[in-house]
Amino acid sequence: MIKILIADGHVLVRCGLRRIIAATTDIAVADEAARGFEVVDKLRIGYVDLVLLEMAMPGISGVDLIRRVRAERPRLPVLVFSTCNEAHVASRALRAGATGYVTKNSDPDVLLAAIRQLASGGRFIDPKLVDAIIFETYEGDAPPYEVLSGREFQVLQILAAGRSINDTALGLALSAKTISTHKMRLMQKLGLGNNAELMRYAIRHGLVCG
């Protein structure tokens, strides 16, 4: 039996995943986590074979959370389950230590195949993203946004999607002051002067995910 930890900030998503997994005979949900820090805590007190992880978790999230999981359990498979179907986001997750990436608009069979593949020691990339990741190329050096921390990258994506600082803070369970600090730093690193430039930059580089 493959025991998994579902880590997603949305109750409805976790319930939906439980229903999908309940229809199988070889996979079981061992536990759930609604916030990033809960993922790390639950890995310390319980045994699971795989973490099914949404990157945009409240608290610790994104590549920072993946790295924390990897530090806690170096050989534990981490399957990212995300709304974002951009190749560069998937690549960022994989470089951080994820062993698989599936988008939330995939068929349930794809998700279950990914879980089984990772549990058997393999890796898995959503078929819709394989070609984009393999042939992902940039002109010259890596794009400037690669210098952003995991949290700065996440804040950039959320703000570029039209969310306010207060909404972003609420969604990530952080203070508005902290979000403002992340925004200031990411804009300095990217050489952006205002919100309009931030929006244009994100759109130009395909960083806006639904």
Image: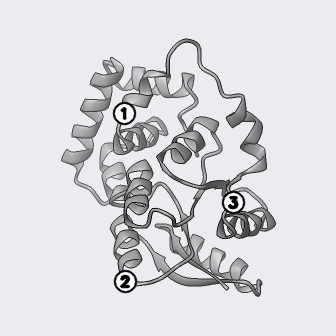
Mark 2–mark 1 Cα distance, whole angstroms, equals: 32 Å
| Residue 1 drawn at (x, y percent) | 67, 86
On screen, residue 81 versus residue 63, left or right, reads right
Q: Quadrant of residue 188?
A: top left
The label nearer to you, 3 versus 1, is 3
The image shows residue 64, relative to residue 87, as above or below, that is below
Q: Residue at x 50, y 67 (%)?
A: 8
Find out whether the residues at labels 3 and 2 contact each other: C-beta distance under 8 Å: no
Q: Quadrant of residue 189?
A: top left
The label nearer to you, 3 versus 2, is 3
| Residue 97 drawn at (x, y percent) | 50, 51
Residue of label 3: 122
- Seen from the viewer's position, the closer of residues 91 and 81 is 91
Residue of label 2: 45
| Residue 196 drawn at (x, y percent) | 41, 22
Residue of label 1: 148
Mark 3–mark 1 Cα distance, whole angstroms, equals: 29 Å
Q: Residues within 10 Å of mark 1 (few under 14, many from 20)?
A: some
Q: Amino acid at mark 3?
A: Gly
| Residue 85 drawn at (x, y percent) | 65, 44
